[in-house]
Image (cartoon, rainbow, N blue to C red):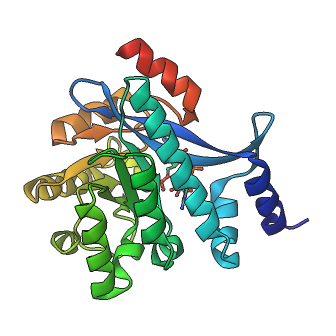
Amino acid sequence: RNIEGALRDALAHETLALHYQPMVDAHSGRIVGAEALLRWQVNGHDVFVPDQFIPVAEDSGLIAELGEWVLHQACMQSRQWRQHRHPIPISVNVSPLQFRHERFQPQLESLLDSYGIGSGELELELTERTMMAGGDATTRLLQRIRQRGVRLSLDDFGTGYCSLSYLKHFPVDALKIDRSFVHDVIADPDTAAITRAIIAMARSLGKTVIAEGVETAAQADFLREAGCTLLQGFHYGAPMPAAELDRWLAATA
Ligand code: G
Ligand code: G
Ligand code: MN
Ligand code: NA
């Protein structure tokens, strides 16, 4: 059977789930957010990983439905953590085709209303590709979403064709430094210099800077000293089921 058919079944039978990876304050180490990452598992084992099935969903048009399902799950989880008195902002990845779909904005706004999502409680992670396509219409949509209190972050920063000078044109709150930089930041002086420059530039523009893929204490120390705001990666915690992060939040409250 093909991935597309299996994905339709998975959507219908809920073998899909969101896992959550903590984002911690670089100085206090406290959890100040979580990135939602889609998992398709049976008995704890991946059926397919997102890099396999997200492209299939995009090619088949199923991405609109899948993306709506993801947003819905994230909004439900946000409300649950709020009710458990561990409110925590959730970041959701949005793919380019999903963002461009005419149903995206109305779906998003109706979910914000239905689940009473407040300002700053939901963040969308978009790539440079998404933000650069669509010209003024995209910029207006980004601004409108932001006016509704949804934060926007530029994901995988440094891997696309976006120059630092573009940053001032994008209405984003945060920039996520791609993990390929973080990976080399200790061993390669050039990567260290570029990473420092990205952090300094982003901060001077008033953006939050998040480093992803932080795997070692040495990387964390470097990034903190360079002025990074938030850190995310296996050093702090891998993506985990909501119930597991729930216990973590309860323990550190
Ligand atoms: O979690 P993992 O490293 O397997 O994710 C691989 C890729 O899939 C990443 O680029 C991530 O942004 C993307 N991804 C994970 N979950 C989602 C999702 O819910 N929606 C979209 N559009 N992409 C996702
Ligand atoms: O493209 P995006 O940044 O959304 O991708 C997130 C992906 O990175 C997820 O699939 C997640 O599993 C993975 N990831 C999270 N933390 C780490 C880490 O410390 N090291 C590596 N190699 N991957 C990570
Ligand atoms: Mn992401
Ligand atoms: Na990323």
In the rendered image, the vertical position of residue 61 relative to residue 203, given as above or below: below
Q: Residue 138: where, in percent of width, then height?
A: 33, 80
| Relative depth, front residue between 122 and 217 | 122
Asked whether residue 86 appears in the rendered view, the answer is yes
Q: Quadrant of residue 78?
A: top left
| Count of numbered badges drawn on the protein | 0
In the rendered image, the vertical position of residue 32 relative to residue 107, given as above or below: above
Name the image quarter holding the N terminus.
bottom right
Seen in the image, is 13 located left or right of residue 250?
right
Asked whether residue 36 appears in the rendered view, the answer is no
| Relative depth, front residue between 221 and 121 | 121
Taking the spot 40% from the left edge, 54% from the top edge, the residue there is 112
Seen in the image, is 205 located left or right of residue 151?
left
In the rendered image, the vertical position of residue 228 relative to residue 64, given as above or below: above
Extreme-left residue of the structure:
204
Taking the spot 83% from the left edge, 60% from the top edge, the residue there is 6
Extreme-top residue of the structure:
251
Q: Residue 64: where, in percent of width, then height?
A: 59, 70
| Relative depth, front residue between 229 and 98 | 98
In the rendered image, the vertical position of residue 141 relative to residue 211, given as above or below: below
Extreme-right residue of the structure:
1
Name the image quarter holding the C terminus.
top left
Q: Residue 141: where, in percent of width, then height?
A: 32, 75
Q: Residue 29: where, in percent of width, then height?
A: 29, 24
Taking the spot 66% from the left edge, 76% from the top edge, the residue there is 61
| Relative depth, front residue between 220 and 140 | 140
